[in-house]
């Protein structure tokens, strides 16, 4: 964020303060075991901001990669707007959570809905596939899907 801020400051110095510093989709990671990663709004922040909040929580025992690695400690939590279905935040507690949070950041930055995220093709047997499954969990029970039906 320091480099990003410096670039904004330098451009503003040359172009008359036309750019603003935006850290609304800045991913945060804590390298614990499992890792904690977050981007966007928390459930509480979304409510305070006036959104009609809808959440999805998917435990890692529903993610094929976690089952294959025999490490199902953790979860994916997504925050969405119930009215627009827009994705507002993502929070991951997983052994490879730091590697997955950027995908959520891009989805939030692009203004994607959780339905759009859930319909994307993700590489099978990766932790980031948990984002797709968590997005699908807003409206269905992913336990009823085969590995390839989602």
Image (cartoon, grey):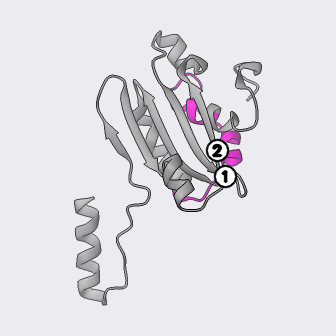
Residue 57 shown left or right of residue 41 in the figure:
right
Kindly check if marks 2 and 1 are in contact, taking CB atoms under 8 A apart as contact: yes
Residue 133 lies in what quarter of the image? top right
Q: Secondary structure at mark 2?
A: helix
Q: Quadrant of residue 12?
A: bottom left
Residue range corresponding to the magenta coloring = 109-132
Q: CA separation, marks 2 and 1?
A: 6 Å
* Nearest to the observer: residue 42 or residue 150: 42
Viewer-side residue, 11 vs 94: 94
**Residue at the image position 47 percent from the left and 9 percent from the top:** 70
Q: Is residue 92 visible?
A: yes
The residue pinned by badge 2 equals 117
Residue drawn 64% across the image and 55% down it: 86
Image location (x, y in percent) of residue 2:
22, 61
For residue 119, above or below residue 93? below
Quarter containing the N terminus:
bottom left
Magenta span contains residue 84: no
For mark 1, what is the residue? Answer: 113
Residue nearest the observer in this picture, 38 or 70 = 38
Dot 1: within a 10 Å radius of its alpha carbon, few (fewer than 14), some, or many (20 or more) residues? some
Judge whether 69 appears above or below 49 on screen.
Answer: above
x then y, percent, for residue 148:
72, 23
Which of the labelled discs sits on residue 69, or is there none? Answer: none
* In magenta segment, residue 111: yes
Q: Is residue 123 visible?
A: no
Quadrant placement of the C terminus = top right
Is 109 placed above or below 146 here?
Answer: below
């Amino acid at each position: 964020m320091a480099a990003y801020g410096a670039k904004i400051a330098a451009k503003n110095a040359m172009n008359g303060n036309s750019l603003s510093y935006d850290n609304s989709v800045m991913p945060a990671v804590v390298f614990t075991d499992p890792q904690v990663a977050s981007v966007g709004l928390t459930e509480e922040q979304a409510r305070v901001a006036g959104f009609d909040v809808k959440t999805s929580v998917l435990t890692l025992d529903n993610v094929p990669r976690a089952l294959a690695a025999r490490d199902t400690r953790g979860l994916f939590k997504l925050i969405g707007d119930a009215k627009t279905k827009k994705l507002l935040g993502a929070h991951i507690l997983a052994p490879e959570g730091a590697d997955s949070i950027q995908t959520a950041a891009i989805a939030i930055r692009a203004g994607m809905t959780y339905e759009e995220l859930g319909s994307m093709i993700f590489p099978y047997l990766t932790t980031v596939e948990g984002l797709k499954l968590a997005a699908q969990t807003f409206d269905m029970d992913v336990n009823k899907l085969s590995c390839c039906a989602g």
